[in-house]
Amino acid sequence: MTHSCAMRGGLAAVAVLALAATMAAQPPQEQGRRPQMPDTGGRSATYDPLKTFAPYTMPLPPSGFRGADGAPTPTYWQNSADYEMHASIDTASKVLTNVETITYTNNSAGSLNSLWLQVEQNTYRADARSRPFSGGSRQRPENINTEGTVFESMELLSTAKGAKPVKAEYVISDTRARINLPAPLAHGATIKILIKYHYTMPGQWGGRTSVESVKDGPIYDVAQWYPRMCVYDDLHGWDTQPFLGNEFYTEFGNYDMYITVPANYLVAGSGLLVNEADVLTKTQQDRLKQARASDKTVFIRTLDEVHDPASRPKQDGTLTWHYHMDRTRDAVFSASPSFLWDAAKMNLPGGKNALSMSFYPAEAVGDEGWGRTTEYTKDTVENFSRDWYPYPWPVMTNVAGFSSGMEYPAMVFDGIRSKGKGLFVVTAHEVGHTWFPMIVQSNERRDAWMDEGFNTFIDIYESEQFNKGIWGPKRDGEYAPGGGYPADEIAKVIADPEAPPMLSRADAIREKYRHPITYFKSAEGLYLLREEILGHEIFDRAFRKYIADWAFKHPTPSDFFRAMESEGGEDLSYFWRGWYENNWTMDMAAKDVKYNDPSDPSKGAKVTIEQNGQLVLPAWVQVKYEDGTDLKIKLPAETWMQKATYAMPLPTTKKIAEVTIDPEHRIPDGNRANNTAKP
């Protein structure tokens, strides 16, 4: 891919040679004059309008399943996978054992000869592909090795009446396993897979799954913990990319988890706690009932009660916690004897309610710490439900543990030591992942920018909304890594010739660029669409439709591009090409401010605007007058469809002090030294 900085140098050299040849061909008496430049068809030394505004081909064409308007068609399909897990933790050996039943339904048009599973605990094996991979920060440390998932047995259970279990034939391939079916699984048919396995918890690790102790006991954060179905879709068939560090792509289904742990433990799990009476005291059940009706946070177990045996139904032996969740892509849990627990009601559209909950150890207590996370979670869910799409599940749980900064359906893991604004920001971000990718599930291993960036975008507005913006705006702090204008920070990123374009495979993006590109440039793209290109009303309607159309489905970049164009009413090909397919830079220059009549400013003026970068965006031009007033005019992107220079008329009757392009730094102009001109 040619980057703009290299392109500048090459085309500039060509222009210099052409100028020299033109002057050499002139008579001597003409060489001192400004040469008559040839017609370049609107191109400048650095900007070619035919390149920016060329017809754009989406990465994937429309199909019978994905429409030209970016929405799934009536024939769109996806397979489903339901899970029933009966898991237990041996706290002496730190071994998790599970008996898992997967009920898998083939909704595709054809038959399946094999099934593929994700077996992500194998990333901890010494021979895992992720070991030499120099990828993201969540790559497991070199000194952590386990046997990975150890299969004790695997059987295929036909749903036909009277059919007997069949021992499954399978092959392990790194973090995947292929099951060879004895007979093809036809369209509409269902099969059950019964798996018994165990694995050793890999110790403390801040990525996905961990066990480590606080003063009141260990905290088990359990994720990536069960073999789960790979996605079979209309794009790749079986999508079996190995786990190298980037996140997930899974099928939706219904989940039942039965988690057996020592009786003095609390278990936080994805979904609804089904058997409260079995695992909670009568006092705790009453407090939960109170929390479901309270906008204020209610303690289910207090700090003092962590050491009180009466806060558990029994002290010896084990208890089994049953969590249920419908229409979800994953389920996780956390278990510890150290947890405090609080909760409050969340108010959702249509008069519905859900429960915001937090589990955290003594080290995290206090209003500067986790004493307010239930409030942060409640506010985030309520705002995003109102602004974008209603929250679909009965609870949202935040857990303070060692697998911090990770998101799952209806449950997130954050850091024990996080406080204040930092805790609010990480809570809003991880909870925000509910919408991307837990509801709208893009393929995170191929297009991480569609979940991390989209989520970072909606976070911007949550930071502005919470408590009248006390911890906003996010764009001037967490969102803009350099602490300045976000657009200026992004301008530095896209000027880097080594920065990858967003339409790169997620695992191929080096750690140096993971946040700048996958999070911040992606978020800035939506921000530009909303604030500069489409406007709030048009963008919001289009974006909400995209979310509703693809809720609990699997969109691609092309589906998103088409959805925003169709509902947004604009041909955005110049933006998809410049912002997503390339890291094109922009440089608009103002020069030659001249009055139409030099002796009479009341007759108006003109300013010459030059386009010197290949990236084009709408831009505001500000005219400041000598009397202190000003005028702002917006130049549309189409200004540059045929030319690189525009003599812009200024409808003014007063003396001009200066003319400035993008005075508020709303767009990523990489050279602001030439943005201002004076008469």
Image: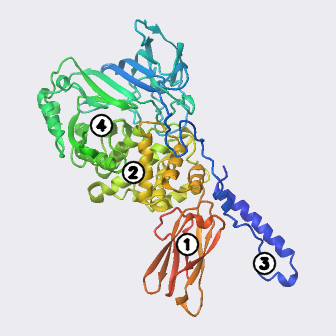
The image quadrant that residue 276 belongs to is: top left
Mark 3 → mark 1, Cα distance in angstroms? 27 Å
Identify the residue under disc 1: 675
Question: Label 1 near label 2: C-beta < 8 Å?
Answer: no
Identify the residue under disc 3: 35
Pick the front one: 49 or 124:
49
Q: Residues within 10 Å of mark 1 (few under 14, many from 20)?
A: many
Pick the front one: 653 or 463:
653
Mark 4 → mark 3, Cα distance in angstroms? 71 Å
Tell me the amino acid under the disc marked 1.
Asn
Q: Is residue 569 above or below residue 26?
A: above
The image quadrant that residue 293 belongs to is: top left
Q: Relative to residue 628, is residue 87 drawn left or right?
A: left
Identify the residue under disc 4: 399
Identify the residue under disc 2: 458
Mark 2 → mark 3, Cα distance in angstroms? 53 Å
